[in-house]
Image: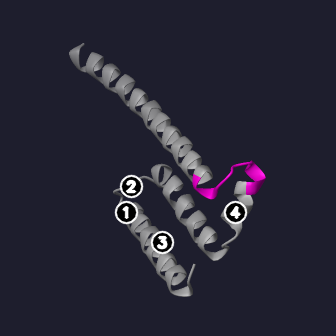
Amino acid sequence: MTTNLKIALIVITLIYLFLILKKIKDKKLQLSFSTFWIISGILLIVAIITPNLIEWLTHVLGFEIPANMLFCITIFTAFYLIFNLMVKLSKEAVKNTILIKQIIN
């Protein structure tokens, strides 16, 4: 990876982190929801700075090529996020049901 590409990726990731922090400050995003996005931004910066980290993790975890590992991690992360959102949605549905029952009575 060229130095110019590394610098561009780091700048883009810092802008990404800045926008997340701005949304938290403007109270448009709760801190609990944004934790994942902040951690992912920090991990992106670490991966950009240490070029052999992905290859080393691929070898340690037993994947054949880095693309397979990144694809697998992405799928499991998406499943985790979907599951987490479904849990929160279920809690809100229960709260709505209780609120409707209180209003009707």
Front label number (2 vs 4): 4
Q: Earlier in the sequence, mark 1 or mark 2?
A: 1
Q: CA distance from mark 2 to mark 3?
A: 18 Å
Q: Amino acid at mark 3?
A: Thr
Q: Are marks 4 and 3 in contact (CB under 8 Å)?
A: no
Compare residues 27 and 14 and report the one nearer the observer. Answer: 14
Quickly name the residue at label 4: 55
| Residue holding disc 1 | 23
Few, some or many C-alpha atoms within 10 Å of disc 3 (few <14, some 14-19, many ≥20)? some
**Disc 3 marks which residue?**
13
Q: Residues within 10 Å of mark 1 (few under 14, many from 20)?
A: some
In three-dimensional space, the C-alpha distance between marks 1 and 2, rounded to whole angstroms, equals: 5 Å
Q: Quadrant of the N terminus?
A: bottom right
Name the residue beneath numbered marker 2: 29
The stretch of residues the image draws in magenta is: 59-67
Judge left or right: residue 4 versus residue 95.
Answer: right
